[in-house]
Image (tube, rainbow, N blue to C red):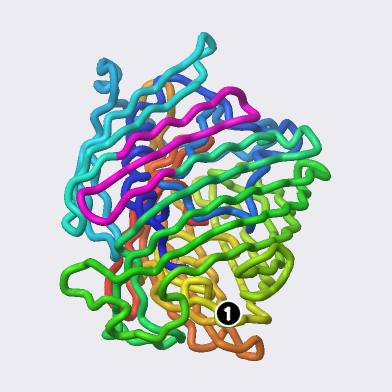
């Protein structure tokens, strides 16, 4: 599915928030769940994840930058800069880049609230910005951390033209110390940047069209925790998607080139998905070793609850992390998604590749192309990164690491399960620049080169 408004806003503005936190060093500490025996396994990863929120919920960083028995990298010599410590808030310049959204410029002040133990309990991060497509806009954001086992957030924003959205997220059971974990998402968004080029692995760039997407979504992730590594997750989703005419100057509206494509107008979706998750990573946000394996299957209907009147799905997502040198982590990812049965399926529900972020059970990463570049019934993607730490800075009470990361992305879409997914792959090579505050905050800029030229993405968290 092409980027929703939450995905677009996340890609443009989440990096500004994370860089604010990085520059501040958070000025205090707060704890994300960490296990004494099994490291950093979170309750909510898996294929039930909703479309990313307007700003992905940042985990409160911890003063502890390591865990018992964890491998410790060799730290380069640290440098220090601390002039921001004297300001009551952080006035962060906002610069976002995305192939579909263009360049966004603005200012983002960030306030951090802590308790008597110097743990962050609240982050407030509004912004004012300008985008050449949609004019001036504002967002209001609040992230609340009542305990180590529970977090919630509320984000709302509006621009002069087209785009607006509201996103509420609630997460509990993060520690997986209880039998159940729960994540709830409620989203309304309207986005004017999604693209459609037709269906197929060779859809031509000259066929580019734009459309406005409006959706309302409610999703739950209900996890049954066998232990900290194994979880059985049930993820129901209710969504209504409206595909409306595009508004971007110089780009044809979808309805002018694909007048009879399935998915135009309003489509309702009720999806049921079951996932089996095995996760031994030493950290959810900044893993250095371990694997995460996810197998999932589901059905989706236009009406009713348990029927396949829209599609059935099955897929696998795997990712692994290995320390190959003291300051170098090899990260690898592979995902495949099949739609065995489809019934008048809207184009946005097909398997897609493109963009700088992937979703388990959804669109996959291909950093030489914008989001939503290729669509078909099934998809395959694999990504490899060498995450090299090259410098370390002391930012107040926290250490900031600079990483330079060469990467390779390979992906394709295809219409039949019998197709060999390893043929006719789109290939992208590139380099990423990341700012990392352990154990949980990553800001990144990825520059990829594919058959259609350069693409630049900014964002929050590692791409996988």
Q: Is residue 426 above or below residue 268?
A: below
| Residue 402 placement (x, y as % from top left) | 38, 43
Residue 131 lies in magenta, yes or no? no
> Who's the residue at 71% across and 67% down the image?
297
In this image, 168 relative to 294: left or right?
A: left
Q: Quadrant of residue 342?
A: bottom right
Q: Quadrant of residue 21?
A: top left
In this orientation, does residue 433 appear? no
Q: Is residue 260 above or below residue 410?
A: below
Residue 163 lies in magenta, yes or no? yes
Viewer-side residue, 123 vs 214:
214
Single out the residue that lies furthest toward the top. 116
In this image, 413 relative to 12: left or right?
A: right
Q: Is residue 424 above or below residue 41?
A: below
**Helix, strand or loop at mark 1:** strand
| Residue 178 placement (x, y as % from top left) | 78, 33
| Residue 97 placement (x, y as % from top left) | 27, 56
Viewer-side residue, 444 vs 260:
260
Provide the residue span drawn in magenta: 139-166
Disc 1 target residue:
378
In this orientation, does residue 133 appear? yes
Q: Is residue 463 above or below residue 44?
A: below
Viewer-side residue, 335 vs 69:
335
Report how many numbered discs are placed on residues in the image. Answer: 1
> Who's the residue at 62% across and 26% down the image?
148
Please tell me whether the stretch drawn in magenta is mainly helix, strand or loop. strand
How busy is the neighbourhood of tag 1: few (under 14 within 10 Å), some, or many (20 plus)? many
| Residue 106 placement (x, y as % from top left) | 20, 42
> Who's the residue at 39% across and 36% down the image?
392
> Who's the residue at 55% across and 78% down the image?
345
């Amino acid at each position: 599915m092409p980027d929703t408004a939450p995905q677009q806003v996340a890609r443009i503005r989440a990096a500004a928030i994370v860089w604010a936190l990085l520059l501040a060093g958070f000025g205090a500490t707060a704890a994300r769940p960490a296990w004494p025996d099994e490291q950093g396994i979170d309750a909510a990863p898996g294929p039930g994840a909703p479309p990313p929120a307007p700003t992905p919920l940042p985990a409160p960083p911890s003063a502890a930058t390591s865990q018992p028995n964890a491998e410790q990298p060799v730290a380069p010599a640290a440098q220090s800069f601390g002039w921001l410590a004297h300001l009551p808030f952080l006035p962060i310049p906002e610069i976002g880049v995305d192939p579909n959204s263009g360049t966004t410029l603005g200012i983002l002040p960030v306030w951090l609230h802590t308790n008597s133990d110097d743990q962050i309990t609240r982050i407030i991060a509004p912004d004012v910005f300008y985008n050449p497509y949609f004019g001036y806009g504002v967002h209001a954001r609040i992230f609340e951390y009542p305990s180590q086992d529970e977090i919630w957030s509320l984000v709302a924003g509006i621009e002069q033209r087209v785009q607006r959205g509201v996103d509420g997220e609630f997460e509990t059971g993060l520690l997986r110390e209880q039998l159940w974990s729960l994540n709830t998402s409620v989203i309304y968004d309207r986005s004017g940047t999604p693209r459609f080029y037709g269906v197929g692995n060779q859809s031509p760039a000259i066929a580019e069209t734009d459309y406005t997407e409006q959706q309302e979504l409610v999703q739950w992730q209900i996890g049954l925790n066998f232990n900290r590594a194994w979880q059985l997750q049930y993820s129901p989703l209710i969504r209504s998607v409206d595909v409306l005419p595009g508004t971007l100057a110089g780009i044809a509206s979808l309805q002018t080139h694909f007048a009879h494509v399935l998915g135009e107008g309003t489509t309702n979706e009720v999806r049921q998905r079951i996932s089996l998750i095995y996760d031994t990573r030493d950290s959810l946000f900044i893993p250095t070793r371990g694997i995460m394996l996810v197998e999932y299957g589901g059905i989706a209907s236009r009406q009713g609850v348990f029927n396949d009147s829209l599609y059935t799905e099955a897929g696998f997502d795997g990712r692994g992390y290995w320390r190959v040198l003291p300051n170098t982590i090899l990260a690898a990812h592979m995902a495949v998604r099949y739609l065995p049965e489809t019934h008048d399926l809207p184009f946005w529900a097909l398997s897609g590749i493109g963009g700088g972020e992937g979703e388990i059970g959804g669109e996959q990463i291909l950093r030489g192309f914008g989001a939503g570049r290729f669509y078909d019934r099934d998809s395959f993607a694999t990504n490899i990164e060498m995450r090299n730490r090259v410098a370390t800075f002391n930012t107040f009470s926290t250490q900031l690491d600079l990483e330079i990361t060469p990467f390779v992305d390979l992906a394709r879409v295809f219409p039949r399960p019998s197709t060999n997914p390893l043929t006719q792959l789109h290939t992208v090579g590139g380099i990423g620049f990341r700012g990392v505050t352990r154990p949980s905050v990553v800001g990144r800029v990825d520059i990829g080169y594919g058959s259609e030229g350069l693409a630049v993405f900014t964002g929050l968290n590692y791409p996988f």
